Amino acid sequence: MYKPHDLPSLDLLKAFEAAARHLSFTRAGTELFLSQSAVSRQIQQLEAQLGRPLFIRRTRALLLTAAGQQYYRDVSQALHQLRVAGANLSATANSRIVTVTTTVTFASLWLVPQLTDFQQQHPEIEIRIAADNFVRDLERDHLDVAIRYAARKLAEPDAVRLFGERVLPVCSPQLLKGLKKNLPRRPEDLNNFVLLHFEDPAIFTPWLSWEVWFETMKAGLPAPPGVLRFSHYDMMVRAAISGQGIALGRLPLLDSLLEDGTLVAPLADTTYSPTTVDRAYWLMAPPAARERPEVQIFMAWLANKAEPLAELAE
């Protein structure tokens, strides 16, 4: 039986966090330079220590149990704090480090894929991503830059608007393969598909619920053949990519996945802006950080990257 003072090893926690984030032992192994079987054994060892299953293992899918979702939230936050602690120590020895805080979703789906360009242009500057879903005190936590999705009134007075957001259904092209005449063309047609739901316990993003989407589309809420619910948006996207159902996609966060065909938008004409207030992604930095050249370079680069998207969801 698991005892509160029995702390699992860091290797087990890192394996669990990676597997939960990717919903895949194989992708977790690739990230951690381990084999799929090694990650699987580590998860089994962790589950044995905790005395309960963390994953639901299916033939072609990996899902978190309710306990697994709660444990993922706690473990990811704890690992984040450890990484921030290390970054703070390193930053004192190397002033060319820029630490960026933002949400897990924004980091994994939009920011990280863009960073190759920054590294090519500025190899002398090290970017560290501190991703979680908490609003951090930048000065207290020694963070240089924040990217937050919020209404204008909640952003800092000198915050820079990057871009807004739109929502539409997305899924894997494999999910639609072979349907031919039965392809979904209207909101009502989604009645034939499993719907992937993002559960937001804090209700910060009500526009990402299917109920709101169907209401906006002036369509009745369907009775789909199945429902899958996720506590983290990026997990839901992974499930959509693997063909487990249809999700509400956030643009432009998923633009690259739509452009390369990883995801498709079967109802492309149902795109809508989630809110009428000036809600957008805002770029912020505390006064002391703004004076550092490397922070100025990063913020200018990010604003330039976002410029083509700046008119979205005004």
Image (tube, helix red, strand yellow):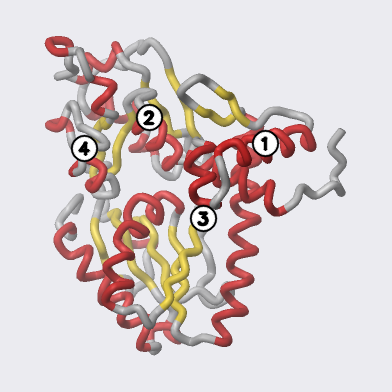
Question: Dot 3: within a 10 Å radius of its alpha carbon, few (fewer than 14), some, or many (20 or more) residues?
Answer: some
Question: Dot 1: within a 10 Å radius of its alpha carbon, few (fewer than 14), some, or many (20 or more) residues?
Answer: some
Q: Residue at x 31, y 79 (%)?
A: 122
The quarter in which the N terminus is drawn is top right
Badge 2 marks a residue whose secondary structure is loop
Q: Please name the residue that numbered disc 1 is placed on.
A: 41
Badge 1 marks a residue whose secondary structure is helix
The mark nearer the N terminus, 1 or 3, is 1
Residue type pointed to by label 4? Gly
The mark nearer the N terminus, 2 or 4, is 2
Quadrant of the rendered image containing residue 286: bottom left
Q: Please name the residue that numbered disc 3 is placed on.
A: 132
Of the residues tagged 3 and 2, which is closer to the observer? 2
Of the residues tagged 2 and 1, which is closer to the observer? 1
Q: Please name the residue that numbered disc 2 is placed on.
A: 242
Badge 3 marks a residue whose secondary structure is loop
Q: Residue at x 32, y 26 (%)?
A: 246
Q: Nearer the viewer, residue 160 or 9?
A: 9
Residue type pointed to by label 3? Asp
The mark nearer the N terminus, 3 or 4, is 3
Q: Residue 56 shows which numbered tag?
A: none
Q: Please name the residue that numbered disc 4 is placed on.
A: 261
Q: Nearer the viewer, residue 149 or 93?
A: 93
Quadrant of the rendered image containing residue 308: bottom left
Distance CA(mark 3)–CA(mark 2): 24 Å
Quadrant of the rendered image containing residue 254: top left
